[in-house]
Image (cartoon, rainbow, N blue to C red):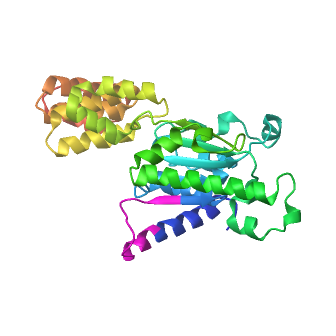
Amino acid sequence: MTADAEGIAAQAGDIGFLIAFARSLPQADLDHVAVVGFSWGGISNVFVAARDNRVDALVSLDGSVRFYPGLVEAAKDVTPARLTAPFLSVEARPEAIEEMQLGGLDAKTSFLNKLKYADFHRVTMNQMVHGNFASRQVAFTLDGAFTEFSRAEVEQSYGWAARYVLRFLDAYLKADATAAAFLKANPERNGVPRHLLAVTSRESTGAPPTREALAAQLAIRGFDAIPEVYAEMRARDAAFELSEEDLNIWGYGLLERGDSKAAIAVLKVATTLFPKSFNTYDSLGEAYQTAGNKPLAITNYRKSLELNPANQNAAERIKAMGGKP
């Protein structure tokens, strides 16, 4: 394994293989899948969850997703909007802000702090360092090698970390109300020794703005509402946007299905968002022409020609409808 994008891809591929292999196991329940990762596995599993809807819950044990924000940012399809599985991050005690900044990290670069479409729980273990999250390391380290915290203190912390992981999985994979209440309760009420750990939680703000979610809303509110629905989704998440290509493909797909009214609504948005593109007006002209509205078809073809006088398609279609380019 290498500490780079290739290393993530290798581990993510392994995780995908294991999920598929689990189908061959009679005791496996593929309707309730969680992926747990320690260290580098705690960045690879994030990539898997963002790309694979088979993942129903995610656990990161002091995962590298905290320390390699650049690798996450470079993967354009691994975004907060694509990560909706409930997420538990069990972390070693944080470094001082000054130390984090020296390492190039701050709150602005944190992927975890940007998550808003998944229930997110953070458990900070105040008496654990990174290596303590590996059971092998805890079991086989000599007593004298434990420095600031003793073996007994680390083992106690490890036990509580394991309890929180178990309750998280019970809450989200088994819909266990008692486990869900455990996650929300003050740690001391759960019997945790004072100062051993801290818990913070954020609930999902709802389904992320996606083209699929936009289409679902339009199926309810009608395609004429696309400007309003799109604006609402952009207000929730400024990173959500439809490209000219997205809108063009969507519009032509609707035309092919015989829904010229919906196609016109979608392609009108394209002309609004990309007013300097001759192609958006050309496509809208075709939609109007298909709908039998020659005046508006000619108007939009002319606008396309104004932006690109070399657009032969628009010129020929105007002539075919008896107009002048």
Residue 157 in the magenta stretch? The answer is no
| Image: magenta residue range | 19-35
Residue at (55%, 54%) from the top-left corner? 165
Answer above or below: position of 107 versus 68: above
Answer above or below: position of 10 versus 178: below
Count of labels in the image: 0
Residue at (64%, 40%) from the top-left corner? 110
Q: Specify whether 173 is left or right of 40.
A: left
Tell me the quarter of the image containing the C terminus: top left
Quadrant in the rendering for residue 220: top left
Residue at (43%, 34%) from the top-left corner? 241
Q: Specify whether 67 is left or right of 118.
A: right
Q: Position of residue 195 (x, y in %)?
A: 72, 40
Which residue is more in the foreground, 198 or 99?
A: 198
Which residue is more in the foreground, 296 or 184?
A: 184
Answer above or below: position of 158 versus 303: below
Q: Position of residue 73 (x, y in %)?
A: 60, 45
**Residue 83 visible (yes or no):** no
Q: Position of residue 322 (x, y in %)?
A: 12, 28
Quadrant in the rendering for residue 211: top left
Q: Position of residue 205 (x, y in %)?
A: 44, 33
Which residue is more in the foreground, 317 or 248?
A: 248
**Residue 191 visible (yes or no):** yes
